Amino acid sequence: MASSRAEGSRKSKAGDPVANRQKQLEAFTQGPENLLTTSQGVVVPDNHNSLKAGPRGPGLLQDFILREKLAHFAHERIPERVIHARGAAAHGYFELTRPLVEYTRADFLQEVGGRTPVFVRFSNFIGGQGSADTVRDVRGFSVKFYTREGNYDLVGSSMPVFFVQDAMKLPDLVHAMKPEPHHGMPQASSAHDTFWDFISLMPESSHMLMWLMSDRALPRSLRMMEAFGVHTFRLVNARGASHFVKFHWRPKLGRHPLAWDEAQKIAGRDPDFHRRDLWEAIERGDFPEWELGLQIVDEDRAAKLGVDLLDATKLLPEEIVPILTVGRLVLNRNPDNFFAETEQVAFHPGNVVPGIDFSDDPLLHGRLAAYTDAQLARLGGPNHAELPINRGVCPVHNFQRDGRHRTGISRGRVAYEPNTLGNGSEFRVDGGEQGFRSVEAELESPRVRRRSPSFDDHFSQATLFWNSQSTWEKEHITAAFQYELSRVETPAIRQRVVDNLAHVDAKLARKVAEPLGIAPPDPKAAAGQAGFREPQGKSPIESAPSLSMEAAANGIQTRRVAVLMASGVELGAYKVIQQALQDAGAVTRVVAAHLGVVASSSGQQVPVDHTLLTMPSLMFDAVLVPGGAACAEALLKDGEAMHFVFEALKHCKPLCLIGESGEILRRAGVPEDAPVPAGVIIGTNEPTARLQMAQDFIAAIARHRHWGRAMVEQVPA
Ligand code: HEM
């Protein structure tokens, strides 16, 4: 039998697990050296000239140094992930804040304060590796917990539901959404015919479509993005008792979106916007943080919730089952090498540890098969668990042998179980209490290839989501549908989508249809289509405020504030506001027409961080324009500077315009007698007003965006 001594040593508590994991990785890390060698370790004396027959050629085949170098170069690429190809990642730790002994035996969920090293990869679902970060998409949020009982992967997503209910439909979904196969366009976008053709024939995707068309698909930052385990899993305690569980990651900085126009422009100006933001925050020491929340459901109660927990197109509103906060996730170290870590990391929903198990969700079961195949193909063989980033922190013992890129050296003559030749006594693994045991259950059901009738409710939660949105969120969803469908060339597809939408909300469908040049929506037409099945379900609640992003204001930590300046700037008010912003955790950057310094009205030299050309206001959360007659005059004459402020105004960002710079508002088309637009602070250089102005500006930034701002359509940007 496997000895309990061996099990005990796996759970050794020696040292700090997070530091130990880092040490483990360091054993594989190479730094720069002042010496160049071949892969065999032979010192290379000349890295500029190949071996030739005479200085003017021809090259010699015996040049093993050149051949090795070129051969390695030619093999540098591995296949990108079929989906979630574009990603960024970071190291960190998970800390338990509430013990879960009554629900699970998972070792890392027992002891409050216990820290487990993690590696987290964020990804875009549909775009290829070189696509832009800020496209409209669902994002992946994969967490690998290196626990003492083995690696546990929570391979989640920025939306709590998925497009399809059964794994059988996943390849069709992806083929429809990826660039169209004849011409390979468009990249990283759902706004094209094949996606909407497929999706309009799949009413089960209605709920996910609402999320995808909402601002959830446009996160301001990966650090300000909520994430979910999507499927229902199980927690299993030491007595074998099991509860259903749904996982939630809630960002400490709140959940905030970009504006659609802004997201598209950022995709051009800085396609790496999200990964840069993550990297820079960690480098600055602003470590991103999330709370782990659980919805735990008694299995006996599950049938009475009015929500089928096995259907991945449904969420469990926290208004029905509240979320229990149990821990926090902190990302505090950037990877050393993108390929070795971010690219080679292999997440798998089937990587679970004792105490965590699967529900019978058919989509999840498909995933359990899919990731193994994907990683065999992508990472070139069955030994990818030995790659440093995928290695567990506990010992691995098994009789799996050989295969490509095997790095472990297994000692001894025994590669089978049971045996007596390994350690001199019988070794047999055929039961016992240790390790992972699947939840036992009676399975007496006919073999069928069909879905549960409870999966037939395709619209009730799409309607619930719609009903739960604020006015601006509804406007953004409507505009997103209009945008996507305006790019669909086939009128019949546009028509099918709005006919389906009428089952979500008649007004939404009518509004979406208005600019599309098609007939008004007809829900009866949709009901006749394939895939549309009765009976219609009903959500147990009408609206769930937790689904809206119209939330209480957060702090302004890590928000980027641009300070737009030109020569002659008055620094009095600026200095007070700048200090207040910095004290509140914001990051301020001076932007001007040129690099170097800007001379203030009193002759001081202010260092410039960025020029208008390289750093548009798209890259900031708020804009401050200090006063000074000469400064304002210069800015008002500079088209780039005006565009900078206009765009910020259009994207509903907080603005603080001091003294003469208030004139910029007039240029933006806001009449003198009109009310000041929401989130815009018009200040003076009056010393007594400075502190209040700083506080007002901070309060405006904390609201993130002022989506209800009037007149944004008129702003020329
Ligand atoms: C049957 C449905 C699904 C199938 C067949 C499937 C398949 C795959 C495959 C083949 C990969 C690439 C894996 C690799 O090469 O390492 C992948 C990645 C991923 N999938 Fe799924 N997937 C499905 C549904 C989902 C759902 C519902 C979610 C969200 C909970 C999800 C989240 C992810 C994430 C986050 C990644 C990227 C992992 C990483 O960062 O490396 N998938 N999926």
Image (cartoon, rainbow, N blue to C red):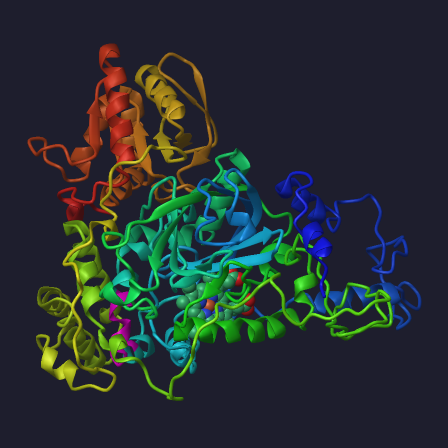
Q: Does the magenta stretch include residue 205?
A: yes
> Seen in the image, is 55 located left or right of residue 569?
right
* In the depicted structure, whether residue 611 falls above or below residue 355: above
Residue 714 seen by the camera:
yes
Q: Which of 300 and 694 is in front in this view?
A: 300
Please tell me which residue is depicted at 16% across the width and 75% down the height of the picture.
536
* In the depicted structure, whether residue 208 falls above or below residue 15: below
Report the predominant secondary structure element of the magenta stretch.
Answer: helix
> Seen in the image, is 490 located left or right of residue 162?
left
Q: Outermost residue, right direction?
A: 54
Instruction: Report x, y in % for residue 625.
Output: 30, 28
Instruction: Report x, y in % for residue 44.
Output: 88, 55
Residue 83 seen by the camera:
no
Q: Does the magenta stretch include residue 436?
A: no
Instruction: Report x, y in % for residue 52.
Output: 90, 66
For the N terminus, the image quarter is: bottom right
Q: Which of 531 and 401 is in front in this view?
A: 401
Please tell me which residue is depicted at 26% across the width and 45% down the height of the picture.
651
Instruction: Report x, y in % for residue 132.
Output: 44, 58
Q: How many labels does the image show?
A: 0
Magenta segment: 199-209
Q: Nearer the viewer, residue 62 or 54?
A: 62
> Seen in the image, is 522 located left or right of residue 140?
left
- Which quadrant would residue 495 be assigned to in this image? bottom left
* In the depicted structure, whether residue 109 falls above or below residue 369: above
- Which quadrant would residue 658 be assigned to in this image? top left
Please tell me which residue is depicted at 88% across the width and 56% down the height of the picture.
41
